[in-house]
Amino acid sequence: MNPNAVARLLVTAFFAVIFAQSSLDKLLDREGNLAYLGEHFKNAPLPPEAVGIMLSILTAIEATAAVLCGLGVLTGGFAHTGFSIAAWGVIMAGVALLCLMLGQRLAKDYAGAAVIAAYFAVALIGIALY
C-alpha cells in the first residue's frame, strides 16, 4: 500500500470514529444535547425552536459522514482515488464541520471554532488526497 493510500485510510477512519461517536451521542442523548445547545445558543441571533431543527440536521449529516467513512474503510474505498464511497464520506465530514463552524460562530464561541478549524484542515487534506 502506498503512503497516499495509508493517509486516505487514516483520515477516513478518523472521521468514521469522530462522527459515529458524535451522531450516536446526539441520537442517544437528544434531550441532553438540546439542553446544552439551548444554553450554548442563548445569545445567538436564532429563535429558540431553531436549535432542535439544527440538531436534527447536524445529526443526519454526521451520521451520513460516519456511515460513508465507515463503509469506505470496510470496503477498501480509501485505496482508490476519485469519488469513492470513502471520498464522499470525507466530503460529508467537511460539510458537517462547516455546519459546526457556523454554529460556533453564531454562538460567538471562538475558541470552539478554532478547534473545528483544525479538524476542517484534516478534512481538506483528506479530500485533496482523493
Image (spheres, rainbow, N blue to C red):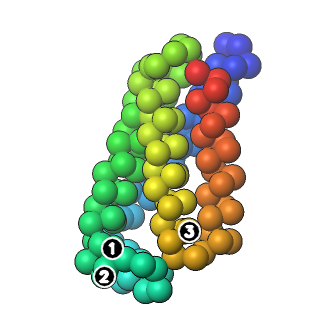
- Circle 1 sits on which residue? 51
Quarter of the C terminus within the rendering: top right
Q: Can you say whether 84 is above or below 90 in the image?
A: above
- Circle 3 sits on which residue? 105
Tell me the element at label 2.
loop
Percent of width and height locating residue 14 = 58, 42
Count neighbours of disc 3 (C-alpha within 10 A) and say few if under 14, some if 14 to 19, many if 20 or more: some
Percent of width and height locating residue 103 = 48, 66
* CB-based contact (under 8 Å), mark 2 and mark 1: yes
Q: Amino acid at mark 2?
A: Pro
Q: Can you say whether 72 is above or below 92 in the image?
A: above
* Quarter of the rendering containing residue 1: top right
State how far apart marks 3 and 1 are (Cα). Answer: 14 Å
Q: Amino acid at mark 3?
A: Arg
Give the label on residue 48, or none.
2
Instruction: Give the residue displayed 33% in from the left and 65% down from the top.
Output: 55
Residue 96 seen in render: yes
Q: Amino acid at mark 1?
A: Val
Count neighbours of disc 2 (C-alpha within 10 A) and say few if under 14, some if 14 to 19, many if 20 or more: some
The disc, 3 or 1, on the residue closer to the chain's N-terminal end is 1
Q: Can you say whether 66 is above or below 100 in the image?
A: above
Percent of width and height locating residue 29 = 33, 72
* CB-based contact (under 8 Å), mark 3 and mark 2: no
Instruction: Give the residue displayed 52% in from the left and 76% down from the top.
Output: 107
